[in-house]
Image (tube, coloured by chain):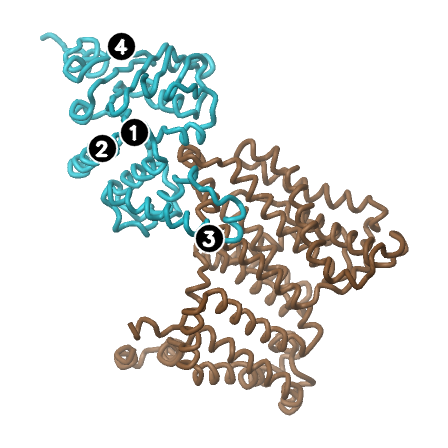
Amino acid sequence: MAVVSETIDERTTLWSRMRVWLRKNYGEVPLFAWLVGALVAAIIEMLVGNPFARLIGMPRGPVLFGFLIVLKTPLLIPPAILYNLVIYIFPTLLVARLLGSLSNRIAGWLMDRSVILSTLIHLGLLYATLHIWASFNDYRVLVVKLILLAIMITLSLNVVNGYMGEFSCSHPGFMAMGAYTASILSVVFFVDDSVFGPAILPPVLGQFAFPLILIISGLVASISALLVAVPSFRTRGDYLAIISLAFTFIVKSLIENLEIVGGPRGMRGQPDWATLPVVFVWTMLCVWVINNYVRSTFGKTMNAVRDGEMAANAMTINTRRTKMVTFLFAAFWAGVAGGLLAHVLRYVNPGSFGIQKLAEVLAMVYFGGLNSVVGSIVGAVGFNLLSEALRPLELYKWIIIPIMIILIMIYRPTGLIAFTEFDVKKIIQPRNRDREA
Amino acid sequence: MALLEVKNMTHYFGGLRAVYNYNLTIEQGEIRGLIGPNGAGKTTIFNLITGIYKPTEGIITLDGENIVGLQPYQIAAKGIGRTFQNLQLWRHMSVIDHVKLAQYSKIRYGLVGAFFGTPLRHRQEQEIEDRSLELLELVGIRHLADQIVTNLPYGAQRRVEMARALATDPKILFLDEPTVGMNPEELKDMMEIIRRVHEELGLAIFLIEHRMKVVMDLCQRIQTLVFGEVVAEGTPEEIRNNPIVIEAYLGKEIET
């Protein structure tokens, strides 16, 4: 490392000098330290965020790193940058640097105990950070929940469109199935409703029945996926795209014409069960299960179907089974995400499961990267943050975001982070192992 | 009883007769060759036996069991492994993944294992991986296990196909022009691998080939196919001297 910094000549830019500095000081900092750093930053913001913001001339602590406020009043750009530096970046960098070697030891110790324990502790830290950061403001809670749901939806569509190389357009339909199933179940059983009558079961049980409701929503979405899968997987080609698109429209107009669930007006009254921890746990479960599936030899048959179905067949792979299982599996998670979405917003209407939703989900998948769990997470988080940050631009947002997607399609046709394996062990391991060895 | 038996197999593509009254018997451990000019229907015969097409007429039995009408993956699982004339590798996948996937029919951990990573799955994945490495060793590309196949030279890609076909645990191996497009060095290696596979695993091999040297060196019996019909069958020596074969395949000698 030292050699690198010596050989640099005067032509180096600020950026590359910063990279060298980062690598020298932070190359061996494990994820553990970064998470603790982020947690400390979140706590600092909770304690002094608002007073500090007022001190530097902002009305209050910015909700989304100052993007929203800056786009409305560009004069506030310097204080917003200052706020981000002082509240988020400096504390995180400082704590990560100070804890570097200690947390390497902790991460190594945890790793030797049990990978599962280590993963859970890292997730715990991540959740604590998110929770504290989000509790600063109700808007943040909603944004975090929606981003977590977007991760589930993107990932489950990536399984079909990326890993299996088919082109499915039915995800909004599956989400609608899940959302309405979950809404009906929770309203019928646990809520006194004007249409569905009084609650059948005591409402206190609802919280505990919620996982079951979500699983049923997922299964309903899976079963409805059979309608698409059976005809379109008899053959290959563009049939799936057409049939699945039709499915989305059929579901939408079906719900619009069902007066009992409110028709086009939608349905409200879902209880407030989709709290941040619930959404977080479901999202992590989804990432874990999907990652397990795509990394198993059983799941990799999807890639074989995509890259050469004839060869796959000749190598004993039952490609039809692979296609059915994968498609139903993806639909299940879309259904679960839909069910959660209905309870996050506490309102569903068929209009939100149309072509715009489809465009959004597809954009997230292709933005993040095909055939990649990390890509989907990056795609969902990036797309949603961008979309929230640019909200003050109103209509222009829908010019800027498509342009960015077009640029990504030109320069990285498979997405930002495509064709990678997501190995939790590599991410949480201590970073100084190679030096010790 | 013969390992593989094909009786009176005929196949039409629409009105075009691709294969007519084709008969074949392959015994355990035999190397059999199939030669013929371009378009004679050699690959079609492969595709018919391996289930990609269903023959219009005829009976195909493997180990005494009728396999006509089964899906290709079922036939493959019953013990017919194959390679393809123009490589059919999965372009985004690593070498070892190719070999692992071909052991699909051995997976017992099911959906539960695939979704939740049970101990059974870890054990089976380990077994599959060990077996894959053995096979890669056998064809001499173990050191390339983690490479993406499209980054490999042509000869190595052929070997991946070979290892992949072997991973299905075949009783009989169908090789569709295994040496096509190879330079003399690669050709020698490939013939060595075919011999090794035959000796070490005791497989029967059914081979389509254009290079006379390869067929004559490797095969015990050879069939010559012209316009979907077998015109000659016999030992390499008989085939080499058969006037019909010489005329149909090597061309007519012009008297000067």
* Alpha-carbon span between mark 4 and mark 1: 21 Å
Specify the label residue B194 is tagged with. Answer: 2
* Alpha-carbon span between mark 2 and mark 4: 26 Å
Q: Is residue A89 left or right of residue A429?
A: right
Q: Mark 2 or mark 4, which has the lower sequence index?
A: 2
| In this rendering, the label closer to the viewer, 2 or 3 | 3
Amino acid under disc 3 = Pro
Horizontal and vertical percent for residue B229? Answer: 32, 11
B125 and A39: which is toward the camera = B125
* Alpha-carbon span between mark 2 and mark 3: 37 Å
On the same chain: label 3 and label 4?
Answer: yes
Q: Residues within 10 Å of mark 4 (few under 14, many from 20)?
A: some
Amino acid under disc 4 = Val
- The residue carrying mark 1 is B175
Name the chain letter of the residue that bears numbered label 2: B
Give the color of chain B as drawn: cyan
On the same chain: label 2 and label 4?
Answer: yes
- The residue carrying mark 3 is B119
